[in-house]
Amino acid sequence: MKREYKIPISQGIVLLALCLVSFFTQALAQGGELRFCLRTEPKTFDPLKVDDDASMAIRYLTGGVLVRINRQTQQLEPELAISSKVSNDGRTISFHLRSGILFSDGTPFSAEDVAYTIQQLMDPALHSPTGDALRSGTGNVETKIISPTQISIHFPAQVAGLDRLFDQVAILSEHSPKKEMAVLGPFMVVDYKPGASVLLKRNPNYWKKDAQGRQLPYLDSVELDIQANRDVEMLRFKRGELDLINSLDSEYFDKLATTSPQVAHDAGPSLDSEQLWFNQVAKAPIPGYKKDWFRSTNFRQAISEAINREDLSRVVYHGHAQPAIGPVSPANKFWFNSNLKPQSYSPETALKALQSDGFRMENGTLKDKGGNAVVFSIITNAGNKARERMAVLIQDDLQKIGIHVNVVTLDFPSLIERMTQSFDYEAILLGLTNVDLDPDSEMNVWLSSSENHQWNPQQKTPDTAWEAEIDRLMREQASSSDANKRKAAFDRVQEIAVEQQPFIFLINKNALSAVSTSVHGAAPVILSPQTYWNAEWLTVSAK
Amino acid sequence: MSFRQKIACVVLALVMGASLGANWLAPDGYARQYREVTDAAPSRTHWLGTDELGRDRFARVLYGTRISLLLAPAAALLSTLAAAVIGGLAGYLGGAWARLAMAVTDLFLSLPWLFLLITARALMPLNVSPLTSVAVTFLLLGTLGWTAAARVLCASAAALRKSDFVRQARAAGTSGTRLFWVHVAPNLKPVLYAQFWLSIPVFILSEANLGILGLGIAEPMPSWGSLLKELEGLVSVGEQPWKFVSLILLIVVVTSFQLLLSGQEEIAA
């Protein structure tokens, strides 16, 4: 019996189409130049000294790291290290490294380079912000090279979330004459025109390969144009001169979504929050009766309750923001305390709470026990349209309970001077940008002794019992290597923050971005860098 | 008065009249937020639509015009008076006085205005009502904006000092004070008028610039500066043409002032 293999015409066409698609996909999967903007001049190309967004972008694209937080899953993944292990006491981390890897200049990579990087990073003279995050206790960080592919790093005291911190540590070459210019990341810096652009080219020695065994990255180059003006950035994107925009404003996003919905991406609530806080510094040059208001939990809660957060999200961010529940955004899947209830909006309840504190309404004006009209100013940075608009909405909301708010916009240096030096302010509306998921990165905000404990910084001993409790809980979570214990401690911190309202959290902005249709493989996420976190897998087709 | 100047007068009178009648023409006021209809197109209820916070744009344009049109002349008057005293006296006295006054004027002219105003705003107390912020903004503009006019007045007063009729009066034994008030000052009047009219659009634009930077008049009070901020980010005129009303009004008013000014310059000449 003879079996006939006949292919019908329709199936043949499908097969041919698949072959063509496969051919073009192969063609697309190589080459191309990705272009996007840096909003400021990069301050440094030394990955250990990075402290600004522009330099961070360059480090992300050029630096090779031992482990990487997957921006999509928020999980730690191996990179140059095949595996990592943190000791039970949280003071030692061991890495097993990949072998046969070369730096961009051809120098071989080994455990010696990791030891050299750590030694440079922890040098106090370097003042490395990345190194500061790894500093714990007194004493030196010791590295022990077990073999060319094995190394352990010992810290003088426990470092919470130690393994995740290595996401920021780009490995330098000990032996390359090019030092920080010899890289292990997918791209390398080949040209820098100050004030204009930074050009990155594909690292010919990059170690990563795709499933078909082709070397990554697919892109030939990345051009980063230095452009501070958002309008110009938007126009250039529309003209096809740029491929990506990160952290898009809601206004621009809506305009883009109307004309080209396929390029506008809303990844949902980000980690960033906007908040209002009152000055609780004892030596602040403001009247004593105002300090009494600001230090009253009832007062702060009433203000929080009188603010319509839904309207802030809807009116100011056109729905591309979520009313904040507490200090942690729900986007931070592990650390967010899901038992917290959304903050309610009720001017009536707010007024009752204030009346229980001795405030009374007289001819539409709220007055305190001493007969002082409740008037205060909210300052925010001039030029930030969203914050200016939020302040005006809050002004209107608080007017409903007889509180008169003066909205003041100041240039940023003046605002910072008042906030950190003279403490000559009443309330401030600003935002908090979170780049790290771990609460350890917020130690500098929550510890009462910290400089960034904005409502009352640098306290010798905690002024209030609840601040003392937050101090204790933050230290407890930082000194434990048990994730569940840490979570329980930080959940309680979030509860206290909501009860006491030292920061009145207003909204969590959505992560908005734009990706040109010529870019393939992009999957915008909430974590920075939103659009090019998987840069080595991206391709750009001809426009 | 030429035909063009008559037209300018009528336009200014109409704009001023409408802004003074804002309470009747837009009874809901400039601060009321219609949060359900933000950034709306013109309609029967909101003739010029609403702004991004749902406030009636027509009301805000009227009230903003009132503020800019009332306070810019006040600031112009202040700066012209300061220029008259400093520049006029320096020119009349001449010698070391003129050199000193002009050195101070040059110093003021060389100072970066914008940064000075930003610094001055930062040093101001925070708890000032929007109305006070209006007064302070224009007071600052008036106090800092006398320099260019002072140079012109100094030159004019110096020319008058050397003129034949002043020499004749001096030879006749007229005292210095009388000479200034009776013979010099009246002849400076046309220059002063010209400088006054010239300053008004300058101050309107200065306030608008400060407003664009968010450093002008405090919210929720409108001014042309804060209204012009709405145009930021607009990429085409056709997108939302009604937002250009404040800009058109500014151009019309400034042009009208310029037309009136050209008349004053002709008188001065």
Image: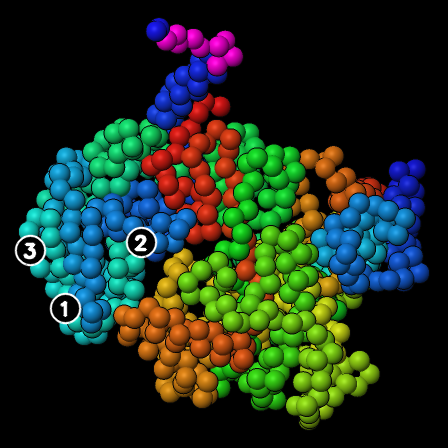
Residue A124 has which mark? none
Badge 1: chain ID: A
Residue named by callout 3: A146
Marks 3/2: CA–CA distance:
24 Å
Give residue B178's position: percent from left, percent from top: 78, 66
- Relative placement, left or right, of A53 versus A119 is right
Note whether residue A287 is visible: no
Callout 3, which amino acid? Ile
Q: Residue furthest left?
A: A147
Element assignment for label 1: loop
Residue named by callout 1: A140
Up/down of A168 relative to A465, above or below = above
Element assignment for label 2: strand
Please tell me which residue lies in front, B133 or B255: B133
Residue named by callout 2: A76
Please tell me which residue lies in front, B256 or A325: A325
Mark 3 or mark 2: whose residue is earlier in sequence: 2
Mark 3 and mark 2 residues within 8 Å of each other at the beta carbon: no
* Extent of the magenta region: A3-11
